[in-house]
Amino acid sequence: YWSHDEQNIITAQSNLASCLADLGRHDEALVLKREIYARRVAINGASHVEAIGSGNNLALSLRRMELWDEAATLLRDQLLPAAQRSLGPDHDFTLNVAQNIALGLMFEPECDDLLEAETIMLDVVE
């Protein structure tokens, strides 16, 4: 029965989190995205493409909620190394994580690392 399949449940939760965010219920979406990422890591491992994708979605929600430091830590310390190790430096997910690090640097209110953001973005587009 499909409802007992863990992957289907997580996919349904991801869809619900997206709906909550679209409705402006970002706090609820963030709670759910944290749970989704934790479950993906527990089931598939931190270096699995679905875990990296869920982590990237979580980081975007953290940024939306202005939790800049937590988003940056997740992207830099967990997601980018996992993506580079398991997917390679040129994989779409790896490049997307790097881009999100750069965007976080660019748009964080107290950021003074625009040169680092530029360097990352140049690496992404090359």
Image (cartoon, helix red, strand yellow):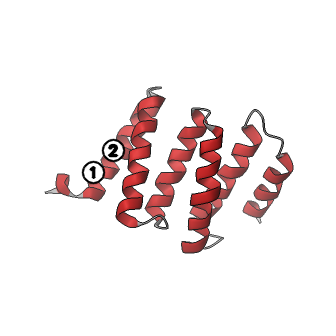
CB-based contact (under 8 Å), mark 2 and mark 1: yes
SS type, badge 2 = helix
Q: Quadrant of the N terminus?
A: bottom left
Residue 90 image offset from top left, x and y in percent: 65, 70
- Residue 78 sits in which quadrant? bottom right
Q: Is residue 28 left or right of residue 97?
A: left
Task: Identify which residue is drawn at 31% across, 46% down.
Answer: 12
* Residue 88 can be seen in this image: yes
* Front in this rendered view, residue 75 or 69: 69
Residue 82 image offset from top left, x and y in percent: 56, 66
Task: Identify which residue is drawn at 43% across, 43% down.
Answer: 33
Picture layout, residue 5 above or below residue 22: below
Residue 32 image offset from top left, x and y in percent: 39, 40
Judge the density around disc 2: few (<14), some (14-19), many (≥20) Cα neighbours within 10 Å: some
* Front in this rendered view, residue 22 or 94: 94
Specify the farthest residue to the left: 1
Task: Identify which residue is drawn at 47% across, 26% down.
Answer: 24
Judge the density around disc 1: few (<14), some (14-19), many (≥20) Cα neighbours within 10 Å: some
Looking at numbered disc 1 in the image, what kind of residue is underneath it?
Ile
* Residue 96 can be seen in this image: no
- Residue 87 sits in which quadrant? bottom right
Specify the farthest residue to the right: 115
Give the number of the disc on residue 82: none
Q: Disc 2 and disc 1: Cα gap in Å?
A: 6 Å
Task: Identify which residue is drawn at 65% across, 71% down.
Answer: 89
Give the number of the disc on residue 13: 2
Q: Which residue is mark 1?
A: 9
